[in-house]
Amino acid sequence: MAGTLLAPEPSLRELGRAILSDFDHAPSADLSAVITAAPTNGVTGVSHAPHGVTGVSRAPHGVTGGGRAPHDVRRKFDLDLKGLGTSAARAFRPAPKPEATGEPRLFCPGPLRDDRALGEQVNEAMLAWAEEIGIYPGRLDKLREANFGRYMMLAHPGTSDPDRLLAATKCLVAEWAADDYYVDEVSLGADPTVVGSRLANLYAVVDPASLPRKYAAQKDAHHELQPISEAFRTAMEHLARYASIAQMGRFRHQMAILFLAWNEEADWHNNRRTPPVWEYLVQRHLNSYLPPMILMDVLGGYELPPDEFYHPGVRAAFTTAGNAAVLINDLYSGKNESETDHNLPNVLVAEDKLTHRQAVLRTVEIHNELMETFMNQAALLSATGSPALRRFLADTWAYLGGSREWHATSGRYHDSKEKKS
């Protein structure tokens, strides 16, 4: 599919914000209140695990790879979602009154915790670090308004340790800065024709490249002059104080996936191509919110073992949650993007010839479908998995609520006068 994306109609630019800011019917941010602990009927977390895998049971008979729980599990948790306000929602809150317009409401919790003082403390520490390493020079006020420290406070309620939250915030800001400087913001030097080489060189910082002495010195000299390189180097050094070797390896793996997705985005720009919806969603699967989400157990002071973290069923649930989370960004960021940027509403307009209002509402439906899938998967895994896995799933749900709240209030997307009180 080829073509130029149309800018959102001015009258609709606030539609996404209005949808995401409506917390009146949001489900609980506590997963245990949404899917109460299911009886295991004698099934332990290891009794049907694939060979060599502990802590996660094989899916019961009748569960397919699509993530649908069997009928008895769905009935137990009332999880047959067909959109917000249906059976899954009724399991833990009153069903919302039907809308006269028939428009879908977002199925996503609000924050489990909102400690504004803690968020401010982390944000100010992050700003001092950003100024020291040289990212966003002359734009630190904008960085302060984005309030990434608040984001990590909201999204990771499993810890109140400001230093752990600061480590996560540094990683997040390094990733966001790389996106701004290398992929999106021409005013900051972004150039789609060199995205690949820039990210390949940056990955040599994420996963340090071992070169002969002469060339290693040249590599190091190059990166010492790159604020983004210093951001990743120092952020990962901070993270390593709390993360195990396996958790650091997980982070590096996710960065490789993220950088691959940014290369695909650059390809679209270089070739002036609007992707079909399925291809855009694949890119969003790679370019989701997993990079900050994978730090949940690091910040919480526990570790989901690799055999559980990479188990196909767990991976499917976790990536589905990450995909849903990033579509909230698509709803909020559209009004700040150029006509050539891609987000799901714009791609839906191009492919399905929808109006922008229809495309925004269709994006909500797609988000809700992903949340339905995650809920079904979380119900099954919570019933058959290990205590660490149940905590990880609960932390995932809490992350989704905190992320929604940040998008509703961050100065990155709203003027201060627009922010939700």
Image: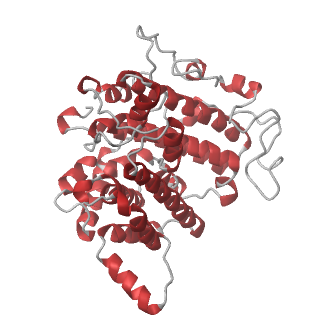
Q: Is residue 234 above or below residue 403?
A: below
Q: Residue at x 37, y 85 (%)?
A: 218
The front one of 111 and 104 is: 104
- Which quadrant of the view contains residue 100? top left
Q: Position of residue 130 (x, y in %)?
A: 27, 64
Determine whether, in the image, residue 216 is placed left or right of residue 182. right
Determine whether, in the image, residue 286 is placed left or right of residue 238. right
Q: Position of residue 413 (x, y in %)?
A: 28, 40
The front one of 155 and 107 is: 107
Q: Quadrant of the C terminus?
A: top left
The front one of 121 and 291 is: 291
Number of marks present in the image shown:
0
Q: Position of residue 48 (x, y in %)?
A: 83, 46
Q: Position of residue 46 (x, y in %)?
A: 79, 50
- Which quadrant of the view contains residue 44? top right
Q: Residue at x 57, y 70 (%)?
A: 245
Whether residue 328 appears in this view of the structure is: yes
Q: How is the image coloured?
A: secondary structure
Question: Farthest top residue?
Answer: 100
Whether residue 106 appears in this view of the structure is: no
Determine whether, in the image, residue 175 is placed left or right of residue 139. right
Q: Residue at x 35, y 76 (%)?
A: 223
Q: Residue at x 50, y 47 (%)?
A: 283
Question: Farthest bottom residue?
Answer: 214
